[in-house]
Image: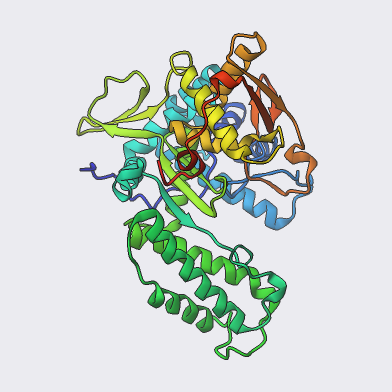
Amino acid sequence: MTVPQSKPIHSPRRFYFLDYFYILLKSVQKYKDKDSIFDSFKILKKQHRLGESKYKPLVVEDENLTKTQLDRYRYTFDQVIEESKDYKLLREPSSGQLSLGEQGKKLLRVYEEQGSLEFNQELCKLMESQYNAFRDIIELLYKANEYKSGLIFLPVYSPRQLGMERSQIRTTEDIFQYAAKLVERLEADIQSYLGQEKYLGKENKRIVDRLIESKLLNENPKSEFAPPKYNVIIKRFRDYWITYFLRDVYGYRYSLTSFEIWTYRAKQIGIIHATEFFPNFKGRIIYPTSVIVKSTRSSDFKLIYQYKDSAGLYAHEPDLVANQDKFVDSLVNGYFALRGRFMSYFINLSALREVVCYSMKISEYLFEKFLQHVYRLNLAGELKIRISLEVDRLPEETTAIYLKQEPVTIDGRKRNIIAIDVAKEILHEPTSEKTRTLWSS
């Protein structure tokens, strides 16, 4: 049973990136008064490409921020300060000036001497000592789907993904049709992925009624649909169904916002993986890359936090050398499963990363370490396969506004496509369903 948290799980400050703690501490290390700290915070925020959502902005904002932009910066700044005080990272005497607490000085040293992952895992200890939020969510994941090692899905289907182009949505009746198709697909997903029978007709009526009450939809099915309301309506459907799945299918008792904040923070710590980009799947999947147990003899698990009831939070961090063959096998199987029947030699590296992370239950950070390790062996001619890593188009070279998937960095260079050449005598044909779908293993 989870030890009760000292603070409610739904009360963290509203920001996703743990790097915000670092740039605040770095700013407070240099300055004392809040205005100077804020100026430094803004500069570092831009350098680290930190955004208010869980995506990093690719477009650099102008030096002359609008009042709205400045207010957003100030809001985030204040939120990070308040949470930093919770963990005794900062001191604020009666003068109103900020200074680093002993815990803050320690964290800065960890970041600068050991890197961001160790910094994030030290933060995890401070957060868990007050909230137990990570334990609460990890235990919920394992309970929700014990047969798939804690894997859950949150469906996200746009009209286009259900066969309806935006240009075809002209009347309220078209939105009703989208709602009906969505419910049909969700019921099928619950049956297929979780083995449960659920009738969602009442829930569908509830969300449609809410849209009518809020004047986003007209009650008359034949009425013309207002195109400017399209994005708002689709977002309402998405948030409603994600919240429904969290609350009624998986049993999460708190808000969608709190779940997203804690889950994304956990991803940066390396104890939960969450993605909206798993190949051939529409929606978001979440699964633990850690366990909560009294003890473990396996050297593949690193103790992150010890709870008062003697249970420990252990991140899955398998040794590079001892597990390099397993990683190579997973890499090869994933590569050929994604490549499929197409003759293209290179495939998307981010897609392969998703498959391998799920197969080995490792974090993106650890995937990068493994790939760098075996790639160096490859260059030295000491690997049974040949790996080619190249760059197609970097996110910065596109018209994208946000970086939604981190590129893989190997030896200081960003890579986003990969090709693998395997001798026939060592080629392991991927078992068809096991590699192609995450629900069958």
Q: Residue at x 71, y 56 (%)?
A: 67
Tell me: 80 left or right of 146.
right
Q: In this orientation, does residue 97 appear? A: no
Coordinates of residue 115 in the picture (x, y in percent) = 54, 22
Q: Residue at x 69, y 53 (%)?
A: 69
Tell me: 147 left or right of 192.
left
**Residue 408 or 282: which is nearer the viewer?**
282
Q: Quadrant of the C terminus?
A: top left
Count every numbered label the image shows and give the total: 0
Q: Quadrant of the N terminus?
A: top left
| Above or below, comparing residue 216 to residue 8 in the picture | below
**Residue 37 or 130: which is nearer the viewer?**
130
Q: Residue at x 39, y 72 (%)?
A: 200
Tell me: 223 left or right of 93.
right
| Above or below, comparing residue 150 to residue 362 in the picture | below
**Residue 15 or 204: which is nearer the viewer?**
204
Coordinates of residue 288 in the picture (x, y in percent) = 39, 39
Which of the 4 quarters of the picture holds residue 205? bottom left
Q: Residue at x 68, y 21 (%)?
A: 412
Which of the 4 quarters of the picture holds residue 254? bottom left
**Residue 89 or 240: which is nearer the viewer?**
240
| Above or below, comparing residue 153 to residue 171 in the picture | above
Q: In this view, which residue lies farthest toward the front? A: 425
Q: Give the colouring mode of the picture.
A: rainbow
Q: In this orientation, does residue 5 appear? A: yes
| Above or below, comparing residue 150 to residue 109 in the picture | below
Coordinates of residue 195 in the picture (x, y in percent) = 33, 57
